[in-house]
Amino acid sequence: MDLDQLQRTLAAAGEPPFRARQVWDWMARGAASYDEMTNLPAALRERLAAELPFSTLELEREARASDGTEKALFRTADGRPLEAVLMRYGDGRRSLCLSSQSGCPLTCTFCATGRMKFGRNLTASEILDQALHFRRAEPVDHAVFMGMGEPLMNVDNVLAACERLPAIGITHRRTGISTVGWIPGIERLTECDMPLRLALSLHAADEALRSELMPVNERHPLADVLEACLRWHDRRRMPVFVEYLMLDGVNDRYEQALKLAELLHPRKAFKVNLIPYNPTDAGFQGSSRAAIDAFRRALEERGVRVTVRLTRGRDIDAACGQLAARAAT
């Protein structure tokens, strides 16, 4: 729902300010229509239904993977495509992967979104409506901004959305923001009062290779990015999660693991998350399980904390790096 338009609509109807809070409370609890908002006068519910769309997004299609992961393709009111994902885990967690932009202006070579035409930043309401869509089906408790776009290039709207996520059931400490290393945005997060989690998409410990994979490295070199992340850690006292996509023959060799360990050690601020590569049209191949295990051992032997991410939603193109809204482009 466009929350600014909600305020204007209620003001035009002569309604008191608390009505906006009532509407939002119903939305956050998963209401599927104005009719469910029984503490609003019937006439007001009818007026809202006539004048204010229930969501800023139009659902175009949904797909469900064999592991329970669900992907939704949306369009904004001006026709911009975006995707969001609900990941269901056996321990009961329900985690959302949210988009912050339609497309992405940063052309990371391994990412399907980066090959889309960039549309625009999403508004805070468009970000929230992704979460509300899934909340209407079931409770949710985690969120990561790892969908379409670079969240910290749209930091004002991302933070505005994050302020409201606890009402939906997602606390700030269970909300993660992933960045390619957009330093102005990292600095904003450092000063922000919300204890949001930070993840850095690194993917190469060598500056030249990282620039080849991620052209943004030319603008924000890795050494500067790591220093910005350390400043964030010094204030937050929470680990920075380092995302490292495992690409066969590109960044998965033993000596590259040693370089990564050297880069991060003994900085206990970082925890590495190795990500099996999910197929796209980019021409890369994922590392073998043996290569991933060897890379992991090399890091652990040098004191680096490391995990291997569980891939989810791969069979519906909902896994890491696969979001591209292909049917909508």
Image: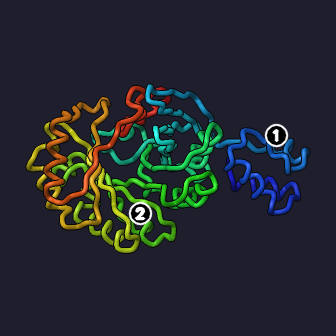
Residue for badge 2? 185
The local secondary structure at tag 1 comes to helix
77 to the left or right of 265 = right
- Amino acid carrying mark 1 in the image: Asp
Identified at 54% across, 49% down, the residue is: 141
**Residue 74's image quarter?**
top right
Identified at 59% across, 57% down, the residue is: 166
Identified at 76% across, 39% down, the residue is: 33
The answer for how far apart the CA atoms under marks 1 and 2 are is: 40 Å
Q: Residue furthest left?
A: 255
Number of marks in the rendered image: 2
Disc nearer the start of the sequence (1/2)? 1
Identified at 53% across, 33% down, the residue is: 73
> Relative to the observer, which residue lies in front, 79 or 124?
124
Specify the label residue 162 is tagged with. none
Place of residue 76 in the rendered image (x, y in percent of width and height, measured from the top left):
59, 40
Vertical placement of residue 160 versus 80, above or below: below
Vertical placement of residue 198 versus 325, above or below: below
- In this view of the protein, can residue 28 be seen by the observer? yes
Residue for badge 1? 35
- Amino acid carrying mark 2 in the image: Gly
Place of residue 5 in the rendered image (x, y in percent of width and height, measured from the top left):
72, 52
**Residue 259's image quarter?**
bottom left
Place of residue 138 in the rendered image (x, y in percent of width and height, measured from the top left):
61, 39
